Every structure is written in C-alpha cells, then in structure tokens.
Amino acid sequence: MLFDEETFKREILSRIPPRDESPLPPNWLHTEMLERFRVLQFAPIREGMNILEIGCGAHALATVPLAYLVGKTGRVVAVDKSRWRFFEEITTATGMKHRIIPLKLDARELPFPFKAFDLAVLVHGVRSLKNEEIMLKVISEMLRVSERIFIAESLPIANNERQRAHLELYNLREEIFEALFGEKDDLHYPTLEKLRELVETTGGKVIESGTFKPSLPHYLAYIPREYVEGIKDEKKRVDLLRRWDAAYEKWKSGAEHPPVGWVLAEKE
C-alpha cells in the first residue's frame, strides 16, 4: 500500500464533501486532515499496527489518517471524553469506519490492564488537557498501555505574519473559555522543550524529537464572536471583544500553521 500524500488526497480527502461553515472555507477539514497526515509521517506507523489515539475529537482529523496508515489489518482505538458530533459521519464518508473502534471515556483512566497497543498517539491534543496535572496523568497512561508513544503539538512560534495572525487569534481562546465556563481550555501552545519535559516527568524515555513546517493554511484558531459576546463580566467582555476584532482582521486575511513539535518515546 502506498502512503504518499497524493494517494491519501485521492483515496481519502476526495471523499469528504465540502462544508458550509462560514467564515471557514469549504475545504477547511481537508486541509486540517492533510496536516495530520503530514505530521504522522514522523511516527513509526506500519501496516497491521494496533494504535491508540487519545483525543480523537469531533472531526476525526488524525483518526482517519491513522486508520489509513495502519492498512486493512490494522486498528485504531479512538478515545475522547465528549467530542463526537461529526465523528461517525466523517469516518463513514472516508471509508475508514471499519478500521476504527471509538471509545467514550476519560483518558486519565484507560481500561486496559496491560500494553495492548503498538503505539499511542496524541496529535494536537495536549492543548485540550486543561492543566499540567491532567497532561501528566494522560501521558503516564499512554506509556502504561503502549510500547511507544507519539505526541505532536503546534509550537508558540511565528516565522511570518500569517503564522502570527494564527497565534494572535488562537491565544485568545484560553481566556475566552475561562471567562465563559470558569476553566481553561485550548491552552497556549507548549514549547518542544515542555513536551519533552512532560514525557520525561512521567517516566518516559525520549527516543527522538523534532519539528516540522506543515506549510498549510490553518483555520482552527477561529472562535465565533458570539462566544465573546456571551461573557458576563463586562470589563472582560469589552477587552476580549476589542482584542478579538483586531486579531480576526489579521486572521481572515490568511493564517498559516505554525511549526509543529513532535516527540517519540517509550517507558524508561
């Protein structure tokens, strides 16, 4: 089986219907899924592998590339606590549903008593783990149930104005969610050094790590202005609306994915 990008685009991305979710472009999901495919080229994935994915998310952005990469004899166990809205629709459309086992559970307490997986992955999910205590617990569980783990996350680096436009809007999300719901989410991106530190703190041995440039547009900094308008604290609402408006003007002119850091590790 060929794992090249053109084959992935033709066999998988072409099956996903365009989406009407303005101001996002109709192909935003295709672009984001392609980025996951590119970052997973740094993971030691082979046909027939049994892979655990933590934080698959509503759109199966990394789940589908993983299912494609493990081939017909491989399986992906996709875990998420709550975000499942479009998951079945997308995995069905891409023809990958039969290779995926979805599990709704908290990744801090995985129900596997032994090393049941060849590889556990967490792609663009560290930022959704709310605090360092949860990060450490989840990574510890990944190391417990898998031979190796692969973690990838966007880095807080802007090498051009388009990447800076992404970061300026994205960096408002943590404050917006905290003001709305009383707890943080979509945390600011960690450094590669922080990713390595998290792994090593949980008893992991880093085998390899690095960075890569996706060279793609990035749309997922966007959060509707209506969210900000719903903040009850007037002072906070006025401040965040002002900052959202300024950041959105730059974002809508074109935002680009910042560099991504990745870590491959095993239990020490």
Image (tube, rainbow, N blue to C red):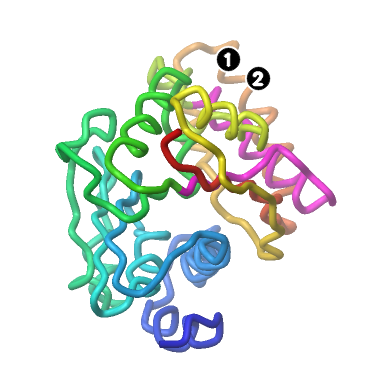
Toward the front, the furthest residue is: 268
* Relative depth, front residue between 51 and 28: 51
Q: Position of residue 255 (x, y in %)?
A: 70, 55
Q: Secondary structure at mark 1?
A: helix
Q: Residue at x 38, y 77 (%)?
A: 16
Packing grade of label 2 (10 A; few <14, some 14-19, many >=20) is: few
Question: Compared with residue 184, is residue 98 higher up or lower down, i.e. above or below?
Answer: below
Question: Which residue is disc 2 drawn over?
Answer: 239
Question: Compared with residue 51, is residue 145 higher up or lower down, i.e. above or below?
Answer: above
Question: Which residue is disc 1 drawn over?
Answer: 236
Q: Quadrant of the C terminus?
A: top left
Q: Amino acid at mark 2?
A: Asp
Region rendered in magenta: 150-176
Q: Residue at x 53, y 69 (%)?
A: 34
* Relative depth, front residue between 45 and 58: 45
Q: Position of residue 25 (x, y in %)?
A: 55, 67
Q: Please report contact status of discs 2 and 1: CB closer than 8 Å, yes or no.
A: yes
Toward the right, the furthest residue is: 160
Magenta highlight on residue 87 = no
Left/right of residue 170 with respect to residue 59 in the rendered view = right
Q: Position of residue 42 (x, y in %)?
A: 57, 61
Residue 4: quadrant of the picture: bottom right
